[in-house]
Every structure is written in structure tokens, then in C-alpha cells.
Amino acid sequence: MSMTRSTTLFKLLASALVLCASASAQDAGAGGGRFEKDGLSFSYPAGWTLTDRSTQLAQDLSLSTTGSLAVVRILVQREVIESPAQFSQMRSGVSTPFFESQARRLGIDKGPSQWGEPACVKFGERLATGYRMKGTLNGKPATAEVYGIVLNQRLVHLAYVRADGDEAAGGPAWKSVLDTLKVEPPANPSPAADQFTRIVSGGVLNGKALKKPAPDYPVGAKATRAQGTVVVQLTVDEKGNVISATAISGPSLLRPAAEEAARKAKFSPTLLCGRPVKVTGVVTYNFVLLP
């Protein structure tokens, strides 16, 4: 899939997170319910209603129950991830809008710095990473746990939103989804799958740099007096070494120098729930010519 087409798909999906879609609902009977379709499956307790708002781009399911504000949402991209670069695009084009939409439900209009502390939840043998947010829901103190994880090359998002008094009601449904959710592997798994299955988002990485060499000013850029700020998207491994660097904004003449400098940077390892993890984030380089 071309980068242009992927970007268009991500924009369409981000819009779909906000727009209402036609939905089908199914009530779980006395023995509980089970969803199983298009490679995604999970179980849920009796008394909960499953609402399906899936589109061509993603499977979008939510669970709710009468008399409670608790909602469990499962959003799974249909597109198979085949490279770290594609994963990074999906994080910015899909994950960020999803996290923002859950924050707005609690009345949080600010960016990631206001989403609360990073959090993780055990998902089988893996850790799903995200945030634990605090706000209000229908005027009541509320909490949202929002996570992302890659399972068999598909990006999965999970959200558990509830008024703080609904923990007892919502807990069993949330636990059931965490314990039973499965994503089938693609027919032709990518050889690069292991490179991005454990990556989490690290935001702006400048403050975590142990070594950040200054870029050389390109001769051609000096000749045309090209100046400005270049933002470089990085993937950093569990030891803090840069394993990929791609400029995502800034003057084109300055981007290669910024990427080269970024690849030589070294960062403090990122720990999540006591475990070292790969992390994606950005660093910035300012190119300024003296008069």
C-alpha cells in the first residue's frame, strides 16, 4: 500500500472515530455472549449489550449495561502492519485521535500532558500500554483506562470508561475482554513483525537524551540560506539506541542532516511496569544561520 493511500485511510478512520455510524446491538443471554468475526474474538458477561459500529477500516465494538455508565470499547484496525514506519504512521493517525476522543469524554481538552500517568495492563503474556485518565462523566467523577497494543500485526485499542462508582459493575466485562480477546495472525506474517510488536509511544524525546550530537549544516542549505526546525520521528530500542529516524517536517534541504544526527543519539532506556520497552517519539533540531 502506498504511503499516500495509507495516510488517506488513517484520516478517514480518525474522522470515523468522531462521526456516528449505524450500529447493530446484541444482548448477552444468561450464559454471557461471544463475538467472533473477521479474525477478532472475545467473550463478555451476561447482561451486557454488544454494539457493533465496524467499518471497512476497523472493527469497532463496545459493551454497555443497563444502570451503569461503564463502557468497554474495542477498536481493531483491519489493515495489517508490515513495517515500523507504517506502525508509526498509524500511531499518529489513529492512536492519537482515539486517545483524544476518550479524554474528551471525561472533559479533558488538553493534550497528552493532561491525560494522566502512563499505565499498562497485562494482556496475556504481553503488556498493553496507555494512560489512566481522571475526569467527569455526566457530572460524576470518572476514570478512563485507554490502551494500545499490536497483536498479530493488527493495531488494537482498548478503552474502559466508567464513573468511579461503577467499578463493581464494569470490572467483570473489562476483565473478560482482557482475558479472552484474540486476534488471528495474517495469512502471510511479515518477517519484520517482531520489530514493532513491543513499541510504545514516548512523545517528545529531547529531555531523555543522554547524547544528542548537533547536526552538520549542509553546504547546499547554507548556500540557499535554508533555515528552520526539523522534527525527526525516532524508534528507540530497549537499551536506548536509535534504530530508525525519519524527518517528518522541516525544510527538505535540512532533513537528511537531522536524520543523520538523530541516528547517532543515545537515550535513557524507557521502563514501563518495570520492563524495558521500545519507544517511538520525536526530537527537534533548529537550524539557524547567523547574519
Image (spheres, rainbow, N blue to C red):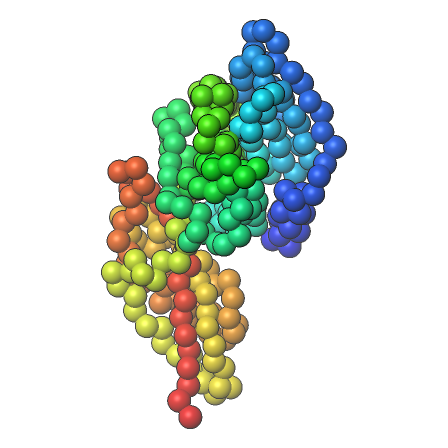
In which quadrant of the rendered view does residue 38 lie?
Answer: top right
Which x, y percent locates residue 46? 56, 12
Judge left or right: residue 15 versus residue 216.
Answer: right
Q: Nearer the viewer, residue 66 or 87?
A: 66
Q: Which residue is drawn at 49% across and 32% down?
A: 163
Q: Quadrant of the C terminus?
A: bottom left
Judge left or right: residue 158 versus residue 272.
Answer: right
Judge left or right: residue 12 versus residue 142.
Answer: right
Residue 174 higher or lower than 271, as above or below: above
Which x, y percent locates residue 126? 38, 30
Q: Which of 146 and 248 is in front in this view?
A: 146
Q: Decide if residue 151 is in sight here.
A: no
Q: Residue at x 63, y 36 (%)?
A: 58
Which x, y percent locates residue 165? 46, 28
Which x, y percent locates residue 48? 58, 18
In this view, the residue farthest toward the right is 22
